[in-house]
Amino acid sequence: MTYQQHYTLPTELLAQIAADGLEALPEMIRVLLNVAMQAERQQYLGVGPYERSLERRDQANGYKSKTVTTRVGDINVDVPQVRNGEFYPQSLEKGLRSERALTLALAEMYIQGVSTRKVAAITEQLCGKAISSSQVSQASAQLDDLLHKWRTRLLGQCPYVYLDARYEKVRVAGQVRDVAVLIAVGVTQAGKRQVLGVSISLSEAEVHWRTFLQSLVARGLGGVQLIISDAHPGLQAARQAVCGAIPWQRCQFHLQHNAQGYVPRQDLKAEVAADIRAIFNAPNRTEAETLLTKTIQKFAQSAAQLATWLETNIPEGLTVFSFPQSHGRLIRTTNGLERLNREIRRRTRVVSIFPNEASCLRLVSALLMETSDEWETGKAYLTFASN
């Protein structure tokens, strides 16, 4: 059964907005939130008002008053209720999240050196009132607490874990340094991706990766069947120390790229790339190893260093053949995490240089939390046979 429900702003509110402009914003937010929550409850019930249907999930049960704090003050909203008590409007949470997102943006403007006067002018245009430095400090503290809780939340079973690092320019002790942002992404038993953790360190040294991986284990990360990453020495040493018993898949994309550094002539590059691609695309490990042996023999004379490198490194990219073929395309590289890093870079590029590590961690954490929420509420990344 389909139905349509139309909600409109009251005429008196429209008149108030026309007369008072942005001063009417609190009332407008209250009405819009109430309208959105009403529509969401109707969608949850599965039928229109006063309709009878076997598809009805529940009965409406009035409203519960709730006061929410926004950047324009406290607003009283009417939260729709249902009889079984299992419904809660996500539109309310999304509305409050939008409030937090705007507060974050304003706080970051202060942090990045935008003058109080300019930010005040922007907030006056958006909200009809300026936000003070003390309010920004309070908002940042609340935000830091929220992000800290997210970064330290308990984890669960994740069969696949991807690890990678990116770099941001941060001012440390009066000098601009390239600071490593360590990121872990997992795939849960439900097949959903989630960002497991993020950490800021001065380098990808083994001690930093080891501390990061130990923190994931301490938070409950378990059931890991495969780790996918590049072969950075610091990460390698930490992985072996903390997760040495877990199989490792070296990113095939990075292997392909690294191999080009051992090709002695430009005219061989395309041929070498094609041969490595054929190994990775083999139907099974036996065939892949056969092709690898042939490739090593092929270049033993014309490119001896390449042949030695292939023999030592390519097998590290073949672990994927021990896992379900349907998962192969998604677990043989860290490309998904690379795309996430590019999105972070797109959002942090405007900052150029972070004034301190805390500011960098705050913004990156907020972006990762947002992405992780979207992944967990979206469709499955892959499917496990037991699901």
Image (cartoon, rainbow, N blue to C red):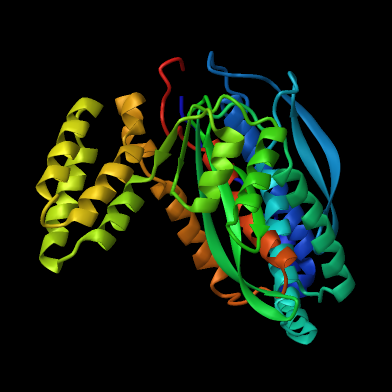
In the rendered view, tell whether residue 216 sits above or below residue 1. Answer: below
In which quarter of the view is residue 103 placed? Answer: bottom right
Q: Residue at x 17, y 29 (%)?
A: 287
Front residue (pair 273, 265): 265
Question: Where's residue 16, x and y in %?
Answer: 76, 67
Q: Position of residue 56 (x, y in %)?
A: 58, 19
What's the residue at 39%, 42% (across, down)?
250
Examine the rendered structure and indicate whether residue 143 appears above or below residue 55: below
Image point (44%, 35%), residue name: 248
**Residue 5 visible somewhere in the drawing:** no
Q: Is residue 74 visible?
A: yes
Question: Would you place residue 278 above or below residue 365 in this image?
Answer: above
Looking at the image, residue 193 lies above or below residue 175: above
- Nearest the camera: 152 or 307? 307
Q: Quadrant of residue 144?
A: bottom right
Q: Residue at x 67, y 56 (%)?
A: 98
Q: Is residue 373 left or right of residue 152?
A: left
* Image location of residue 244, percent across then percent down: 54, 32
